[in-house]
Image (spheres, grey):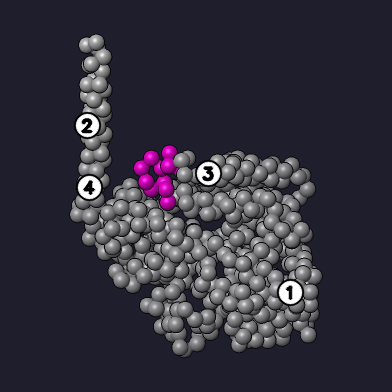
Amino acid sequence: MATLLAGPSLLSELSFARLIAIAVIVLKVTGYIVSLAAYNLLFHPLRRYPGPRLWAISRIPYARMQMSGKAHRIILQLHQIYGDVVRIAPDELSFLSPDAWNEVMGHRKRGEEENSKDPDFWKTQKHSVISANREDHSRMRRILSHGFSSQSMQAQQPLIQSYVSLLIQRIHEASNGGSLPLEMTSWYNWTTFDIIGDLAFGEPFGCLENAKYHPWVSLIFDRIQGNAFNSVIRKFPCSEFLIKMLVSKEAARKFRTHFELTKEKVEKRLAIEEVRHDFMATMTNTNEKLKLTYPELLDNASILIIAGSETTATTLSAVTYLLSVNKEILRKLTDEVRSSFNTEDDIHLLSVQKLNYMLAVLNETLRLFPPVPNAIPRKAPAGGNTIFGRHVPPDTILGIWQWPMYHSPEHFLEPESFIPERWLDDPRFVNDRKEAFQPFSFGPRKCLGRNLAFAEMRLILARIIWNFDLSVDPRSEDWLQKNESFSLWKKPDLYIYFSPRK
């Protein structure tokens, strides 16, 4: 009986002990959060940089912004309030001055540390030329640069032309004499993925032939947005646990499938014995001292597919839209293209280089709608760095956001307007800060594929303008404003009418 009577009392004591333990844990966690917030706001080495207080206290506002799809616009608003350098997270700075390209990403003297790529951003592709340390980057760049030389581009021209011809043929077929609008974000992606697939792996993805995405290409798009989400989460404590908790099993399965398909494509290409002038030949035909490891081969092949397709397709989508809604600019470009060639066969990688107005159109498109709108973050070295005369502590994240840089009225007159003449010495734009415009990045790590990208875009656009008159479907009249940014753009459908040239 005594034991039974003692039971409830003992249970009460145990419950009370649990409550005390929980209260102690809650108090400790709360105390840690409050202390961390106070430190970030009042004592952190970045405390004197301007920016919103809540963003200085915690990474939560920054994370919400990144996942909103409107980060590019929010960053510009913050710079307009706080100036050229803004603290956008406890340990992160954003720069808007054109001089920041050199301060953050420029060449460094021998023995001087660079601001390296942020490893959290590139964790799933840490063996690629983009994310490599300084020494490995130099080695990989020497290897890969041969694939982007003028000689290589000439050797690749018949292959590129064949896919552009297939695109023109498919547009003729699918547009039904101009009566049916085509969804061009897909058509351009199909074209660029087929080209880069053949250049990297020795075979296309069959997107143009089948007028649909190859399953692996669809996995790449899923991965782009997933990587943006993961890179935000990695800045929080227990990030890998959070990623496992928050990422669905389906997303994890797709990531594994993407990796396995990359391996399968690489190994299939390596088994080809015939001589090919493609990127895989460049990556494998080198001496032992420079040779890429197998993980480097996989990651660089994966990077080439994304960088060599999605960004080019994005610019082609944007320029097609902008021309369709700016009829006078479209007329000028049409006059240039159709008066510069006698036949369509005269349009090739070399001949399109004389189209000066087209280059201005593409530059203005890249300014209004850069393929990489957000920052590709750098990280201050172990000894810190001096930027604009101020010491930046070690491990500070440093970012230059392209879309805000190009849309700042401090840098460009009428920044929201599509005016190709600003790139043709029009005196109205003599005060434009053209050095701010770096769509292919800056410094020793600037994009290797710039010349190939421009050649490909000029060729595709010239042949489309040669063959068709363009007009936008009413469903896509506000296409530019509907785009969301997640490192790269999440593009809505773009419907365009292609009337065969009369």
Marks 2 and 4, Cα distance to the nearest angstrom? 21 Å
Under tag 2, what secondary structure?
helix
Front residue of 416 and 358: 416
Q: Looking at numbered disc 4 in the image, what kind of residue is underneath it? A: Val
Front residue of 373 and 28: 28
Marks 1 and 4, Cα distance to the nearest angstrom? 60 Å
Which residue is label 3 attached to? 248
Which residue is label 1 attached to? 180
**Image location (x, y in percent) of residue 481:** 51, 72
Marks 3 and 2, Cα distance to the nearest angstrom? 36 Å
Looking at the image, tell me whether mark 4 or mark 3 is earlier in sequence order: 4
Q: Looking at numbered disc 1 in the image, what kind of residue is underneath it? A: Leu
Under tag 3, what secondary structure?
loop
Q: Which one is in front in this view, the residue at disc 1 or the one at disc 2? A: 2
Question: Which residue: 30% across, 71% down?
Answer: 81
Q: Write down the region rendered in magenta.
A: 232-243
Looking at the image, tell me whether mark 1 or mark 2 is earlier in sequence order: 2
Figure quadrant of the N terminus: top left
Question: Which residue: 22% across, 24% down?
Answer: 13
Looking at the image, tell me whether mark 1 or mark 3 is earlier in sequence order: 1
Which residue is label 4 attached to? 34
**Image location (x, y in percent) of residue 372:** 51, 63
Mark 1 and mark 2 in contact? Answer it, CB < 8 Å: no
Question: Which residue: 35% across, 53% down?
Answer: 60
Looking at the image, tell me whether mark 3 or mark 2 is earlier in sequence order: 2
Q: Which mark is residue 20?
A: 2
Figure quadrant of the C terminus: bottom right
Residue 212, compared with residue 318, is above or below; it is above
